Amino acid sequence: MNSELVWGASFFSGSLAQLIAHLSGLPAVVLLLALGLVVGQAGLHLVQPETLGAGLEPLVGLLVSLVLFDGGLNLRLAGKELQRTVIQLVLVRLVLGLVGGAALAHWLTGLSWPLAWVFGAIALATGPTVIAPMVKQMRLQSSLARVLDAEGLILEPTAAVLALLLLQLALGDLSRWQDVASLLVLRLGGGALLGALAGWVLVLVLERLPQEAEGLQLQVSLGVLFLVVAGTQTLLPEAGFPAAVMAGVVVGLRLDQQASRLDELIAQLAQLAITVLFPLLAADLSWSELSPLGWGGVACVFALMLYRWVVVQFAGLGLSYLRWPDKLMLSWVAPRGIVTAAVASLFALELEAAGVQGAGALKGLVFLTILLTVVVQGFSAPLLAQKLGLVELELDAASEAALDPAASLTAGLQQQPGGEQVGTLKAAE
């Protein structure tokens, strides 16, 4: 199969999944994953990502950075309670999540401790590429949506860097845990600094462009983003992802309303990236990589999903921002996404090249984690949100007008003769 047909089939599979999701109301991320399996090595063998060669990895990295940049544009952590909640959740998950994930992988699947630590780091990432469409489709309350978005945007690049360092430790390229800690701080800090600098430069350029030149603004933004991500990756491996997030945050905060218009264009491209990447990476999975794990792998993933409840309880200590329904919802929504799949595929190749036993088991366990978290949580999370009363309320046109004085004329057109408005506040279906 030539590369053009691979990309064409991937785009078609992704767009078909989005169409079915729109018509049926089923979770889009589940359908994207399912169609990827159907057309890939686990199904019809129509899409074979390995035919794309070495060019696949950098392209996936750039497209993922686009999704992270879009998330950074929308990241708003106004209020000390929200900021404290996100920081506390991230720090507790970074420690307890890493230790728990490694222990479960070692005890339940038999992975060696070095590879179990690598899995624990990879499993930290709760992908914005999956959470964003899931949260949007279920209409989760904005307070919880902001926490989940921020958690994913911070932990996904952190997990990628940490997993790479732990892989180097497993391969003997690093000799001490102290080296892992120092390099983690260096790469995350260096990536964030370069991203902030690029975001500042981009703001200066965009402020001087006419507001009606939206197409040019988009092209300049993508050019700066891809350059800083590629340059950062060259200087500091895996640090391009934190650079992408920080660049988006700086642009979003500095441009304000102009950033909102830019984000509409970026969001469409980010959605397109998700649509093509998810089926493409899922197509690389074969059942032969999952079958050796047996029930131990399934037990490991479900134990990991339940263990998050313990982590969130510790993370929520002393936080008035989170009520018990919020903690329960946060405990259940933690799907893994594209970065997790891409990192696992790359690491498996490096481990096999180094002759390390267990590379296939590591990749299989990571993809099994993606499969089960996306499918189980994709179907159950919307129902849980409704049961807990955490679905965002939406206003019909008349009620929005009643709350917005600037829209009073529109509201007046929808009023009954007696002056009472017809619109009512209703819960999202």
Image (tube, helix red, strand yellow):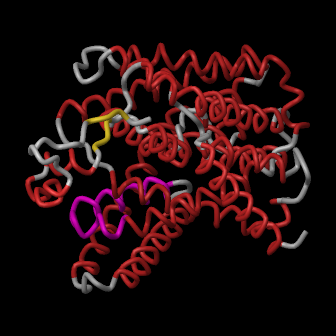
Q: Which quadrant, please, contains the N terminus?
A: bottom right
Q: Nearer the viewer, residue 31 or 159?
A: 31
Where residue 213 sits in the image (x, y, percent)?
Answer: 32, 85
- Residue 256 vs residue 227: left or right? left
Q: Nearer the viewer, residue 102 or 134?
A: 134
Q: Is residue 317 above or below residue 69?
A: above
| Quadrant in the rendering for residue 115 | top right
Where residue 190 sits in the image (x, y, percent)?
Answer: 40, 56
| Residue 247 lies within the magenta run | yes
User: Magenta residues: mostly which secondary structure?
Assistant: helix
| Residue 200 lies within the magenta run | no
Magenta range is 239-263
| Quadrant in the rendering for residue 379 | top right
Q: Is residue 250 above or below residue 390?
A: below
Q: Which quadrant, please, contains the C terminus?
A: top left
Q: Is residue 182 visible?
A: no
Q: Nearer the viewer, residue 12 or 274?
A: 12
Q: How many marks?
A: 0
For image coordinates 51% across by 58% down, the residue present is 236
Q: Is residue 75 visible?
A: yes
- Residue 32 vs residue 207: left or right? right
- Residue 427 vs residue 285: left or right? left
For image coordinates 37% across by 17% down, the residue present is 325
| Quadrant in the rendering for residue 169 | top right
- Residue 347 vs residue 92: left or right? right
Where residue 310 sits in the image (x, y, percent)?
Answer: 47, 13
Q: Nearer the viewer, residue 9 or 305?
A: 9
For image coordinates 26% across by 85% down, the residue present is 209
Q: Is residue 200 above or below residue 404?
A: below
Where residue 125 sits in the image (x, y, percent)?
Answer: 54, 38
Residue furthest out toward the front: 417
